[in-house]
Structure formats: structure tokens, C-alpha cells
Amino acid sequence: MSDALTYLVKARPEAMGHYFRFLKQAGSKLDPKTRSLISVITKVHAQTERGLKQYVKRALADGASRDEILDAMLMAFPALGLSKIVWAVDVLLASGLPEFRLEEPAAARWHRVGALEAFPEGAAARVACDGRTVFVHRSNGGVSVYDSRCPHEGTDIPLQAIEGGELHCPKHDWRFDLASGRCVAKGDRPLKRYPSRAEAGVLYAEW
């Protein structure tokens, strides 16, 4: 809170109390992530650096991803204009937040997931492999390897989430068909599927 607002709260507590109650009630029908994203937009519009950093951190804590924050700003382009969006991105790049660091992606390579016989037909398994966790599903003579993270908010889905031929994300109940990776309930994005191959009885996946 700015020094001016702090002063007004002390000097005119009753009037400022109405103001803060209004702000609290105005967003009562929105989920926390949406409220935080809207607050980020207001701080970009006002170009208040401290407020922008504060609400970006709050949006991240409320479940927003870096890309959702950037999309929110870009969608508000008609109101913000490019110069304010560029200013905001400069602030975020200089803030040191790990979510806004750009790193060169590592070249994809093949990883040994396990012996093919360890994955029986019609069953699914969760495997930790070279710093990544994947789900392996074998059916109709083929093998599918999926990222264990839900495409919604990146929740790492546990082994216990396998129910029959489906995978259920425990956070928001997105459901996926393990044979195809397709989302069959709640959401609209499929599991991330990695290229895979079998060689000399060993399953490999590329990422």
C-alpha cells in the first residue's frame, strides 16, 4: 500500500473502510486466480512497478502460469497498448522471478524407460526416468508414453490416479483416456505424449 493510502486510512478510517470493503466485495464472484490476473492488468495500466510485482506473485501463488499472465496482458492490448505491456515485461524480466527466466531448451534425446516386458498389455504404469515422471500404457500392440503432469495447471498426477483405462487428475478432476491421451471429462487438452520406440526389448522415449 502506498504512503498516501496509509495516510488516508489513518486520517479518514471510516471513509477508507467503505472503499476497501467495496474492493473486497467487487471480486467476490470470481475465483482467486482470475481476480489476481485482473489486478495485474490494472497495475500494468497504472504502471506501478511495486504493485505489478506484488500481484504477479499473487497470481502465481493462486495458480496462474507465466503464459496465463502474459496472455492476460496481451488480451488487454486494446486498453493497455504495446508500450505498457513492454514496460511490464521489462519489470518482470528484471524481477528475478524464476517463472520469467528464459532458458535455451535442451536438445531432445532418447531416454531408457524400462524393459518392455515390465509393461503388460492393457495396464498402465508410472515411471521415474532421468528427472522426469511418465505414464506408460500398452494396448493393441502399441505403447504410449505420457508426461505425468496435467496439462491444466501442471499438477503431477500420482499412480493412485489410474482407474481402469483412465487417469484422473486429483486437483480439478480432469480425466484422460490412457489409450489415446485424450481428455474425456472436465477439460479440453490432452496429455502430452512423448515419441517412443522399442529396441531389443527395451522401451525408449524422447524429450
Image (cartoon, rainbow, N blue to C red):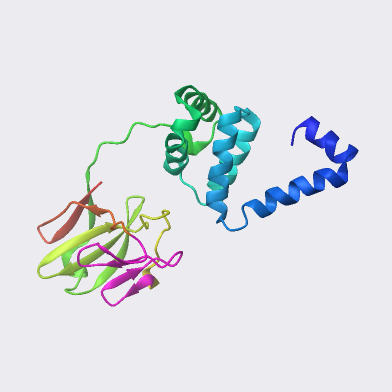
Q: Position of residue 120 (x, y in %)?
A: 19, 73
Residue that extends furthest to the bottom in the rendered view of this protein: 164
Residue 142 in the magenta stretch? The answer is no
Q: Position of residue 167 (x, y in %)?
A: 32, 69
In this view, 146 is above or below 13: below
Picture mark count? 0
Residue that extends furthest to the top in the rendered view of this protein: 83
Name the quarter where the N terminus is drawn.
Answer: top right
Residue that extends furthest to the right in the rendered view of this protein: 11
Residue for point 22% across, 66% down? 137
Q: Where on the picture, by quarter, is residue 113?
A: bottom left
Residue nearer the viewer, 18 or 73: 18
- Residue range in magenta is 161-187
In the rendered structure, the answer to whether residue 112 lies left or right of residue 71 reads left
Residue nearer the viewer, 87 or 144: 87
Residue nearer the viewer, 101 or 41: 41
In the rendered structure, the answer to whether residue 110 lies left or right of residue 155 reads left
Q: Where on the picture, by quarter, is residue 178?
A: bottom left
Residue nearer the viewer, 63 or 40: 40
Residue for point 84% across, 40% down? 9
Residue for point 21% across, 69% down? 118
Residue 186 in the magenta stretch? The answer is yes
Q: Position of residue 156 (x, y in %)?
A: 41, 59
Q: Position of residue 6 (x, y in %)?
A: 82, 36
